[in-house]
Amino acid sequence: MTPQSEARQPTVPAVTADGRAAVVAPDHMRVVVFSDAIPGRNGVGTFYDDLADALEEHVGAIRIIAPPENPTENEPGWSIRMPGDPTQRVHIPSLPALWNQVRWTQPHVILAATPSAYGVVGLLLAARLRTGSAYCYHTEFPKLAATYWTGIRRRVMPFFLRSWDRLLIKVSPAVLAPNRELSEVLAAKGRSDAHVVGTLAPRDFIERPVPPAPTSIGSIAFIGRLAPEKRIDQVLDAARAFPDLAVRVVGDGPLRDEVDRAAAACPNIAVHRWVDRDGVREILDTTDLVVLPSKHETFGTAAFEAMVRGRLTLVSPACGITEWPELCAALFIMEPEETLTQSIARVRALPPDALRSTGERARVAATRVHAGAVHGWLGLLQLLARSPQR
């Protein structure tokens, strides 16, 4: 839909004549998300891509403003390679270009999904428009600094990131967290009023018929960034330990060369670069067990989507998905001192009926959590739209 066609539609103003936030029904709500992640390309990008897909039929409009997937020479703004990870870029947007996109939408709520320039611009424009807004806290970036940076940057950047984190958390009208652990981090930084929000799945994942739940483990898949914090080395070790397993590694990242070398030496490893959402669903539907042995994982979107499709899922205790009791009861969790290889061996030893019932419970639990998250998001958006601006 073009900005001009949006402007011609009957709209409910985001603010009243005296500058106060307007009361708006969910089906008239207009939401804009500012993200520096290309939709579907990493965890945060997928989170908001799925959010938009799931809420599209419930709100008036939801729009993601993010860097273009294939930028042209004439694209406004610029970007630089992310230090320590050449497969990702830090994007600096054009303020006039973003302003033009937002003013046509007339949003009731603006969500800043990143602490980078895109998120800051989103919060500034929300203040300019006197519309509801929130900073969405997905990642403790200071924790990742030691993983990606060395030398002086490793000493300086955590301090800078902590200071920047605290500033955005302090000045944002509202803050959101995708799990309870991060809400506790926000509370320690002075925001005890953080809202815990649910992760959603694409409607296609929910509505399409699912294949029968697995009764044995003949294939596993890792879906995510090929990065140190994901412990991709354990996935490769498991492939070597179980040559009878078909192992698929789906994603891209700084460890891509290491994964390619392992695949060249192990015939049971298949590597897929980035795939679209339909491709992810097809991979899930033909996989018995999805693994996520991460050191840090805000939630674990791939694990949740696997559960939606009735697949078996094995995650580390560091994955935020384990904090949701209804989901935790229908997935497998690695023991604290277990390697992924040992965990897979433990799951493979279970009888067929136990595996099948776990997959069936996963589907039921995940779809219930999804439905609850839809209602939770709609209520939260209404609250944000009515919140006083500062």
Image (spheres, rainbow, N blue to C red):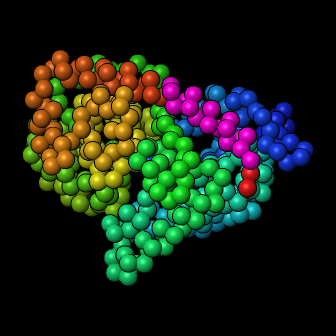
Taking the spot 14% from the left edge, 46% from the top edge, the residue there is 338
**Residue 290 x/y as whole percent:** 28, 37
Nearest the viewer among 158 and 37 is 158
In the figure, residue 125 lies in which quadrant? bottom right
**Residue 358 x/y as whole percent:** 26, 23
In the figure, residue 357 lies in which quadrant? top left
Which residue is situated farthest in the bottom direction here?
152
**Residue 85 x/y as whole percent:** 39, 66
Taking the spot 28% from the left edge, 31% from the top edge, the residue there is 331
Taking the spot 60% from the left edge, 60% from the top edge, the residue there is 170
On screen, residue 155 versus residue 45, left or right, reads left
In the figure, residue 92 lies in which quadrant? bottom right
| Quadrant containing the C terminus in the rendered view | bottom right
What range of the chain is rendered magenta?
371-388
Residue 36: in sight, yes or no? no
Which residue is situated farthest in the right direction here?
17
Check residue 340 for magenta coloring.
no
Check residue 387 for magenta coloring.
yes
On screen, residue 127 versus residue 248, left or right, reads right
**Residue 99 x/y as whole percent:** 75, 57
Nearest the viewer among 151 and 5 is 151
Q: Main secondary structure of the magenta part?
A: helix
On screen, residue 371 versus residue 358, left or right, reads right
| Quadrant containing the N terminus in the rendered view | top right
